[in-house]
Each structure stands twice: as C-alpha cells, then as structure tokens.
Image (tube, rainbow, N blue to C red):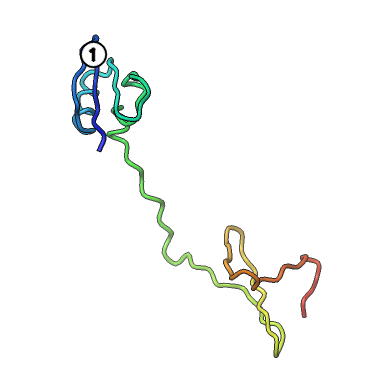
Amino acid sequence: MSQWHLSYDGQTEGPYDLATARAKAAANPNGYAWRDGYAEWLPIAKIGELSQSAAAKTTPPPPSKAPGAVDEIDYKVFGTEMQFVEVELDPGESAVAEAGSMMYKDPSIAMS
C-alpha cells in the first residue's frame, strides 16, 4: 500500500494512506504530493489518485443486453463423409474456432 507525503508551504506531512491523503488533498488541493515511485514532488491537482473527481468517480456498469435479444445462428451443412459447416454471421457477431479448423473462401465462390 502506498504511503503518501504532502507538502504545503514547504512543510511536509505524512506518511498517509490513500484515503487520508485524499481527504487532506480535498481539503487543501494547493499543495504537492509524493509517494514511493515518484521522481519528484507533484502538484496535488495533477495527481489523479488524489483528485476529488477520482475519489468520487465510479465506473458505470456496462449496459445490459435486452432480454430476448438472442439471434438464431444461420448455418448450412455441406458434404456427406467429409462434412463442413458454413456459418453466416450478422454484423457485430464473431466466431471462434480451433486453429486449422476454419476454411476461408471468397464470397463469390459457391460451395456445394
């Protein structure tokens, strides 16, 4: 866990944990901060971890898929002894297959 040091008007404070450093930085954002790994003291306003917006910012959850939005898979099976399946994908869909198990063809070639 990082230990933060703050500096106001040449007077250093700390070490503080992140929560305490955020609280002190929110109360007075006009100082400088340093922690292990920093080459020099940086203005608090330039440090995302200590900014008020970073403490209040949360990542919104990803949009949920509408129920019933499942689409059918369009496919055709070709051949009798040596079969292959041709799958037609809709825009935005993708397919994953084992290496060497996919055949690629030009759209103008008809497979029958």
Q: Secondary structure at mark 1?
A: strand
Residue at position x 57%, y 72% in the image: 73
Looking at the image, residue 84 lies above or below residue 97: below
Q: To which quarter of the image does residue 60 belong?
A: top left
Label 1: few (<14), some (14–19) or many (≥20) C-alpha neighbours in 10 Å = few
Residue toward you, 43 or 38: 38
Above or below, 55 against 91 in this view is above
Looking at the rendered image, the quarter that the N terminus falls into is: top left
Instruction: Say left or right for 93 vs 42.
Output: right
Number of dots carrying numbers: 1
Residue 86 in the image: x percent, y percent? 67, 74
- Residue 88 is left or right of residue 32, and the answer is right
Corner quadrant of residue 98: bottom right
Task: Provide the residue designation for mark 1.
Answer: 8
Q: Position of residue 8 (x, y in %)?
A: 23, 13
Residue sitting nearer the eye, 109 or 68: 109
Question: Where does the C terminus fall, quadrant-wise?
Answer: bottom right
> Which amino acid, by three-letter code, is at mark 1?
Tyr
Residue at coordinates 58% horizontally, 58% vertically from top-left?
A: 92
Picture coordinates of residue 111 (x, y %)?
77, 76
Say if 72 sits above or below 20 in the image. below
